[in-house]
Amino acid sequence: MTKIGIIGGSGIYNLLDLALINELPIETPYGKPSSHYSILQSDTNQFVFLNRHGKDHDIAPHKINYRANIWGFKEIGIKKIISLCAVGGINKSYVPGDIVFPNQIIDVTSDRHKTFYDDSPLYHIDFSNPFCPQLRDYFIKAASEINQFVYKSGTYICTNGPRLETSAEIKYYSLIGADMVGMTGMPEAVLARELELCYASCAIITNFAAGIKQQPLTVNEVITTMKQSEAKLNILLKQILISINENNPCTCNNVLKDASIN
Ligand code: HPA
């Protein structure tokens, strides 16, 4: 069974030439995940796919059951999760269509369940590097092998949504070091780490964040850029799947060892 999971939006079925092998309906102690988990086969790899916004894209970012989604992957036996996400570009170098592999996170979300460890035993996991460095290295290697330009690092700020940001908020986020803004990276990343899973994001800049350009933001822009980026994302994702060594152990798989007070 594959150890690779992908979390993405609805565009993914168009991304790869995929055969659906099976669908796994998973129940978790935290409730229902966003949808069934699909076992998909590309011409080189098998992996498990979950659409974070649900099959019909009707689960808002603040309503996603992040704990159930990540728990489900663990239950299936997944070890490494590739997250595909759309983000607004804050860094002035970014233009829509660019690909970034973020290496840092700032979390400004609220009222989301952000831990599996509410009760004893308590764990305070190391989250200095929120994205798995080993998985990010596979991403970087894959991009370089196909000569795909990517930004190899950047800081992702996670907002609550579902509204987009104000121009003043984006200015502030820029001042505190954010390069891109999205609504789903947290608590997805920390929950994966808490269950000792590797997790890294491949972010697509779908729009200039609010106020970066003097034009109103539209969701149409986000969808159009996503569509226009499909071909290169397809090639990159295929190469990432080839580059990953599923059986290579990683320090993410051992974070609880030094994280308990009890
Ligand atoms: N803000 C927040 N989330 C997003 C954006 C944005 O501009 N674009 C895509 N996801």
Image (spheres, rainbow, N blue to C red):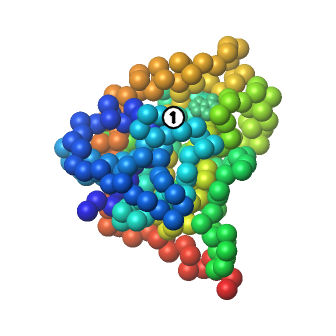
Rendered-image quarter of ligand 1 = top right
Quadrant (top left, top right, bottom left, bottom right) of the C terminus: bottom right
The residue at which mark 1 appears reads as: 58
Name above or below for residue 261 compared with residue 243. Answer: below
* Residue visible at 51% across and 65% down in the picture: 29
* Residue visible at 72% across and 42% down in the picture: 177
The reply to whether residue 92 is visible in this rendering is no
Question: Can you tell which quarter of the image residue 143 is in?
Answer: top left
Number of marks in the rendered image = 1
Identify the residue at the far top of this view: 215
x then y, percent, for residue 185: 58, 47
Identify the residue at the far bottom of this view: 262
Closer-to-camera residue (155/150): 155
Name above or below for residue 215 compared with residue 11. Answer: above
* Residue visible at 48% across and 54% down in the picture: 32
x then y, percent, for residue 184: 58, 44
- Residue 132 relative to residue 211: left or right: left
The reply to whether residue 249 is visible in this rendering is yes
Classify mark 1: helix, strand or loop: loop
Q: Amino acid at mark 1?
A: Asp
Closer-to-camera residue (162/148): 162
